[in-house]
Amino acid sequence: MNSVVKMLLKRIGTSLVVLIGVSMLIFTIARVIPGDPARIALGPNASIEQIDKLRERLHLNDNIITQYGYFIKDLSNGNLGISLYTNRPVTTDIAQFLPATLELVIFAGFFMVAFGIPLGIIAAKYKDKWQDHSVRILALLTVSAPSFVWAVILMLLFAFFLPLFPVAGRIDDQLLLPDNITGFLTVDALIDGNFTVFVNAIWHILLPAFALSLSGIGQAARLTRANMVETYKKPYIEMAQAFGFSAKRIATKYAFKPSLIPSLTIIGLDFAAMLGNAFLVEAVFAWPGLSRYGVQVILRKDLNAIVGTVLVISAMFLVVNIIVDLLITYINPRIRLAKGQ
Amino acid sequence: MNNPLLKITNLELGFNTFQGEHKILHGLNIHIKAGERVALVGESGSGKSVTARIILGMFDELTSANFSGDILFNEQRLDLMTKAQKHSLRGKEISMIFQDPTSSLNPTFKIGQQFYEVLRTANPKIKKQAANKIAIDWLHKVAITDADRVLNSYAFQLSGGMNQRVMIAMALVNKPSLLLADEPGTALDVTVQAQTLNLMRELVTQENTAVLFISHNLGVVREFADRVYIIYKGRIVEQGKTHDIFDNPQHPYTQALMAAVPRITGGGIPEIDDTSERYYDPIFIHKGGEEIGDPV
């Protein structure tokens, strides 16, 4: 069997084990935190009988292991239960909210790589010169302030004082939405051939995605710089310089590729972490995404929705990790060839 | 007498440190004629490798380094050249071979790609196909028979000796007039080192390439070099034809250096002084080994 396929199967196998572990953990935690979900869901005016009925329906009177058994049984049918908050199946809710978050995170991840890595290369190439210092200051600023602070600042600057971008939402209300195929507005608009919606969706996503990506940009820049500076000390870079390779080719190719390998893992983790960090940015920009949904269901102790949301986000995290591993295998010949033998 | 290819006059180098300037080189005078093989011999930290790097201009970025002295290469003042001018000499007029061939080749690019980049420095418009042909040709010259496989490999897939041959081919492919060899093959075992050095000597003789051979290995130097400079703590202490120096070492430091070579016949590791006032004795120049243009 192809070695890459073998590795992929192995990684998917371990990921499934991790997911089962996560499900047990979050299942228990959701039930251990104080407060009666049935009482919160039905409100202060509900009668004891009504509450008892709901508790019965949610299997809340059984012990926790039996409850987990019910959960796994439902899950094997692709059923995550009914959300007490929206009164719809949790899977429907997730299908509605997840694409918005994914779209936001993918844009943010793109910004992180497209700005962070070049800034790191520049900083390393001009080490200890003004370019390096500027990147350092920028990186410290972006890393030290949390993303929601940047969200508010960016919103004030570029949506309020300088009304270049919209303040909130995914799209202008008066625009007709394209057919929901992928749930990604930009992609759906392109499939639909509706260019106005496409531009409008991009226009809406730029500011929140940028706010979300800023700390990632800073981290990616610092990381790339550190790894590049290390690589510049390697004999093969001295050799490249002694042989007259152009400084630009060294920076963007011969020193960059070896430096990318250690950076990539962390950038991948950062990218996955944005899925969780997105909720504050989503809250500021009224972005109808899964992270915001997750916060709301936690506050309402909506058990099924909490477990479902966390499971989906963990699954995304694992998928991103597998993709990063594949990329590293592709870039690093040492790993690629070792596995091929 | 014809003009030298490289003439270094009164080269001084110091680094600024927190304790003030730390002097590394105290006025070196070295010359190399075209096609001549000259060795610079000394212990670790004596300033041999630094000299090679100054010739290539690789300390220019370092603000803490102070130079003085003239470096004349092919009638041009290297020390007065701009960065771009110096850069255009590297890999074409002057090239370099390093201590450890395996770590001197990039682990993330195939040998072929690196060869192509070397050829591109001399001829930016060269096509990959043409470059490949030249590379194969040169790998044959360094006695690599399966050149195709080597070009499609990464350095970590090849043996140290193989990488050293690749480095030699890369260093000579653009037909430089000067090759700086910084302890070439010190990281290899002795038999492989001997093979690759023989190869290198054959090729530089063929191509009439001058070599500045930097080493602490006296046995290798004796076989390889026409002329020898002995360097101690940033000063040349003795210079002359190779056989004059080996047959009749005059300077106390040279004598200590010779005595330090363990004998195959036994007798233990020789005892010599680490430092001695006598090592700072004035330079001894053998007849025929004088600087060109110096009053004899």
Image (cartoon, coloured by chain):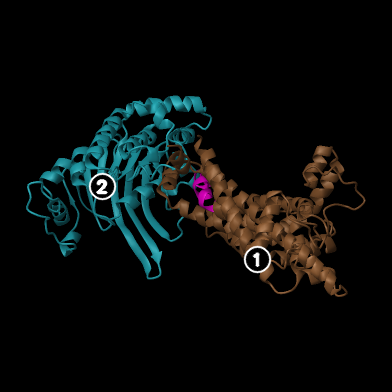
Chain colours: A brown, B cyan
In the image, taking residue B257 as reference, residue A147 lies left or right, namely right
Q: Determine the residue positioned at 38% across, 62% down.
A: B15
Same subunit: marks 1 and 2? no
Q: Quadrant of residue B182?
A: top left
Quadrant, the N terminus of chain B? top left
Residue extending furthest toward the right: A174
Tag 2 residue: B215
- Front: mark 1 or 2: 1
Q: Is residue A252 magenta?
A: yes
Q: Are marks 1 and 2 in contact (CB under 8 Å)?
A: no
**On what subunit does the disc labeled 2 rest?**
B
Separation of marks 1 and 2 at Cα, in angstroms: 75 Å
Query: Residue A237: image x %, image y %?
Result: 44, 47
Q: Main secondary structure of the magenta part?
A: helix
Query: Residue B48: image x %, image y %?
Result: 30, 51
Under mark 2, the amino acid is Ser
Task: Out of B216 and A182, give the one closest to the viewer.
Answer: A182
Query: Is B176 above or below relative to A21?
Result: above
In the image, taking residue B158 as reference, residue A315 lies left or right, namely right
Under mark 1, the amino acid is Ile
In the image, taking residue B206 as reference, residue A146 lies left or right, namely right
**On what subunit does the disc labeled 1 rest?**
A
Tag of residue A64:
1
Q: Determine the residue positioned at 90% across, 46% down.
A: A176
Quadrant, the C terminus of chain B? top left
In the image, taking residue A300 as reference, residue B85 lies left or right, namely left
Q: Secondary structure at mark 2?
A: strand
Residue range corresponding to the magenta coloring: A250-264
Q: Residues within 10 Å of mark 1 (few under 14, many from 20)?
A: some
Task: Out of A254 and B43, give the one closest to the viewer.
Answer: A254
Q: Secondary structure at mark 1?
A: helix
